[in-house]
Amino acid sequence: MEVRGPGPKLVLVFSGKRKSGKDYITDLILDRLGPAVCTVLRLSGPLKQQYAQEHGLDLDQLLGPGPYKERYRADMIHWGEARRCQDPGFFCRLATAGAQQPVWVVSDARRLSDLQWFQSEFPHKTVSVRVQCSDETRQKRGWSFTTGVDDAESECGLDEGVHFDWLITNEPTAPPLDEQLQPILKLAGKAAASAIQ
């Protein structure tokens, strides 16, 4: 299968609260579509890479789920906000640089400016997806409220005033994720097929 043409055929922009399961779901999509068709783009990756570089920190630990990342999270958020104020698309451009697959899955949009950048750069190709679950479920996954993090724009920027194309409920009592993902996977399959010669 040979993919041709510059840029994506479909951009799936995911958002949701910490511990809602965004990474788990976007990894499921990658697993279903395969790496030749789909790439997962993490806006936090370039942010953390740049932050680690400028502050002399361990990038591998910042990318991981452990306490090292949590120790720097609040400062990293403030630093990232300052960068975005100067250039709203800074981290989006870094994350998408070199992406060749026809389907891009952005796993961690956190602000309206993130979503707006993709909608502006890839109009008619960008689809927004919100992953939601209860605070109780998030707590079972290890979340606890942190002042300066959970009440910051990076967690609340897409909570209100945004119409999402799809909502996925990631709860034990919700329909199975495979069932909820079927329309998204079908759309992605059509987009990938349009890129194959």
Image (cartoon, rainbow, N blue to C red):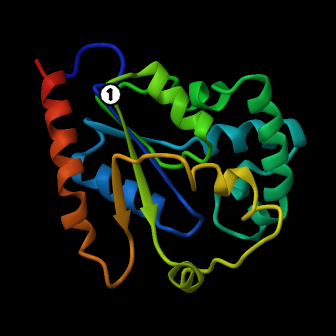
Residue for point 79% across, 24% down: 86
**Can you say whether 173 is above or below 180 in the image?**
below
Q: Position of residue 94 (x, y in %)?
A: 60, 27
Residue for point 78% across, 71% down: 146
Q: SS at mark 1?
A: loop
Q: In front here: 181 or 5?
A: 181
**Can you say whether 6 is above or below 128 in the image?**
above
The part of the image, by quadrant, that contains residue 90 is: top right
Query: Would residue 190 appear left or right of 107 to someone viewing this image?
Result: left
Residue for point 30% across, 78% down: 174
Q: Amino acid at mark 1?
A: Lys
Residue for point 25% across, 36% down: 37
| Residue assigned mark 1 | 125
Q: Quadrant of the N terminus?
A: top left
Query: Would residue 67 appear left or right of 88 to someone viewing this image?
Result: right
Q: Position of residue 107 (x, y in %)?
A: 48, 48
